[in-house]
Structure formats: structure tokens, C-alpha cells
Image (cartoon, rainbow, N blue to C red):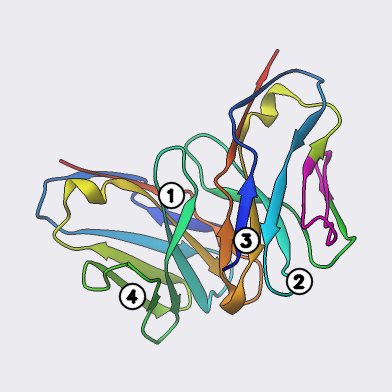
Amino acid sequence: GDSVTQMEGPVTLSEEAFLTINCTYTATGYPSLFWYVQYPGEGLQLLLKATKADDKGSNKGFEATYRKETTSFHLEKGSVQVSDSAVYFCALLYQGGKLIFGQGTELSVKP
Amino acid sequence: GAVVSQHPSRVICKSGTSVKIECRSLDFQATTMFWYRQFPKQSLMLMATSNEGSKATYEQGVEKDKFLINHASLTLSTLTVTSAHPEDSSFYICSASQDLYNEQFFGPGTRLTVL
């Protein structure tokens, strides 16, 4: 069945460091792909999305490119801030409008 | 973006009691709402999908008699955990969308602790 795999956390970075969080997926067809962010004690917020191959989603300095060849949707940011500390979830849109989430990657950014 | 609220944000109850969690879309009409369960440091697991005015569709392994879902209006869905037990303790999150394939907007979650 369809699934999403993320790199395990926690990831600890210093402020202004480069961030990559890997995400790969298994799916029949070409699903839409998403990155969500969850701040402590809160629900999920959509960070960015891509709906077809080679699309690049971007928001708040974060980027991810839908790579059909490698079935990947890695999240990147050139310079992280302390305020980026959160849990990041990669997800794909499954049949019937359902989202399948990866296990989440906790990011901690130190000043 | 659209706003989804959940109430209560946190609830503690005794084993054997029932707990109702509300999910409201505040500024849009949600024909579809989803209920998720999240264990500590784990991913979200979809429990059920509810469409306004019809019965909820439960995911495999989710007890429909245990987790009662009602979606009586375009702005409100409720999840009732019946005869709660400590293993039902979890973070429950709802999401709402204008239709099945539109963006889902997530509520802030409800922390349920069953003693």
C-alpha cells in the first residue's frame, strides 16, 4: 500500500545552519505531496505542497521538490532559526482524499 | 487560512466514562471532516472520515462503537469516546475540508487522559 518514510529525528542544528529532512514515498500513481509542521502543543499547519512531478513547493524559506524518479520530497531550508523548532511531517494524498503521514521528524534549533 | 477549533483542548476522565470532543470549522463550510489519533512522538493515524449528513467511514481496526462520530452540520463534527479506558489516552486531532480533495485544515488537538 501507499506509504511515506521520513528520516528519523531528532535533528539538532545551530541557528543559520542548512536543513534537510528526507522524505520518500511509495504510491500507485502520482499523488500530491505535502509538508506539515506541528509546533509544541498545537495541531498541524500546512507548510508547502506539490501536486505533480518536478513541482517545487516553497514557503517561509522552506522548499521541497517532487522527484518522481527517486520518489522523494525532501524538505530544505538554507538558514534555520530557533523559531523553526517543531515536528515536521511529510504526507501524501491517498485515494478518497485521505492523507498518509510519515512518522515525523523533530527539529531542534539552538541559538 | 481557514480556522478549525477543537474543544476541549485537554480532558482528564475516569475509566468507564464517555468523553465528547468537538471539532468546528469557524469560517468555512466543511463537507468532510477527518479524525486522527496521535501517540507521543509518533505520526497521525487516520481513524475515520465523516461527511456531513451521512455515516462516518472508519479505518480498518478502529472500533466504530467505541469511537462515535457525528457530523450533523457543515461546521461541526463530534467524536465521542465511549467507556474510555487508559489505552484510549492520546492526542486526538481533527481536520476539515470543503470537499474531499481540497486542502485539509487541522484543529489544535485534544489531549485525552483516562485515569
> Marks 4/1: CA distance?
17 Å
What number is the disc on residue B70? 4
In 3D space, how far apart are the residues under numbered discs 3 and 4 (Cα atoms)? 21 Å
- A108 magenta-colored: no
Q: Which residues are magenta?
A: A58-75
Q: Crowdedness of circle 3 by 10 Å Cα count: few (<14), some, many (20+)?
A: some
Q: Is residue A11 above or below residue B16?
A: above
Please rate how many residues cluster around mark 4, counting C-alpha atoms within 10 Å: few if below 14, some from 14 to 19, many from 20: some
Identify the residue shown where x is 47% and y is 43%: B42
- Label 4 is found on which chain of the structure? B
Can residue B98 be seen here? The reply is: no
Which residue is identified by label 1?
Answer: B109
Q: Label 1 is placed on what type of residue? A: Gly
Name the residue beneath numbered marker 3.
B2
Numbered disc in front, either 4 or 2: 2
Q: CA distance from mark 3 to mark 2?
A: 27 Å
**Horizontal and vertical percent position of residue A93:** 64, 67
Find residue A25 and report its image quarter. bottom right
Label 3 with label 4: CB-CB less than 8 Å: no
Apparent side of residue A92 relative to residue B87 in the rendered image (left or right): right
Number of other residues with Cα within 10 Å of mark 1, as a class: few under 14, some 14 to 19, many 20 or more: many
In the visual, does B52 lie left or right of A20?
A: left
Chain ID of residue with mark 2: A
Which of B24 and B87 lies nearest the eye of the viewer?
B87
What residue sits right under mark 2 in the picture?
A: A30
Q: Nearer the viewer, mark 3 or mark 2?
A: 2
Q: Check chain identity for marks 4 and 1: say if they share one.
A: yes
Q: Circle 3 sits in a helix, a strand or a loop, which is it? A: loop
Magenta segment, principal secondary structure? Answer: loop
Q: Are marks 1 and 3 on the same chain?
A: yes
